[in-house]
Amino acid sequence: MKHAAIAALAFASLAGGAAANEVSGSFEVRVKPVPDEERPNDSRGRMVFDKTFSGPLSGKSEGEMLTAGSPKTGSGGYVALERFEGKLEGREGSFVMQHSGIMESGKYELDIKIVPDSGTGQLSGIRGSAKITITGGKHFYTLNYTLP
């Protein structure tokens, strides 16, 4: 019994003492390139974007993205910071997500994390990660998170 209690305490400390939650929904995104000086033979670019989320995560976000790659081949990479403001399962506030992505020949690997201590209001202390899927030209999210 002693070992089971120690294991339970260890798990609770790893999880931050909060239960993990998963929510899914959809979002619309609008991306706009930021005009930049001409750089011959340089594939880097900068974009701004905004999203409107529907479902358990409802609200708006805006972000900035740095990109590099070849639109002709569908390969490239990006990093972005995105600030969400709205409600998550009825709790109101904001938080920032950090993106890192690689695309190769139309396939992609994305890593999206909630920036620690970026939560405000009722979302203060939020931790987690997100996944994006695109099906039939529509965007969907799955957010895994914990709140204290």
Image: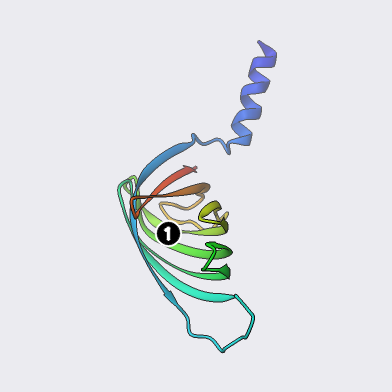
What residue occupies the far top of the structure in this picture?
Answer: 1
* Coordinates of residue 78 in the picture (x, y in percent): 57, 64
* Coordinates of residue 54 in the picture (x, y in percent): 30, 52
Looking at the image, is 100 positioned above or below residue 34? above
What crowding class fits label 1: few (fewer than 14 Cα within 10 Å), some (14-19), or many (20 or more)? many
The kind of residue tagged 1 is Ser
- What residue is at 59 percent from the left and 31 percent from the top? 12
**In the figure, is residue 36 to the left or right of 52?**
right
Where residue 100 sits, quadrant-wise, is: bottom right
- What residue is at 59 percent from the left and 75 percent from the top? 44
38 and 8: which is toward the camera: 38
Residue under label 1, please give it. Answer: 94
* Coordinates of residue 133 in the picture (x, y in percent): 43, 48
Give the tally of numbered discs: 1
* Coordinates of residue 27 in the picture (x, y in percent): 34, 55
Scheme of image coloration: rainbow
126 and 27: which is toward the camera: 27
Secondary structure at badge 1 equals: strand
What residue occupies the far bottom of the structure in this picture?
Answer: 37
- What residue is at 61 percent from the left and 23 percent from the top? 8
- What residue is at 43 percent from the left and 38 percent from the top? 22
- Image quadrant in which the N terminus is located: top right
**In the figure, is residue 146 to the left or right of 26?**
right
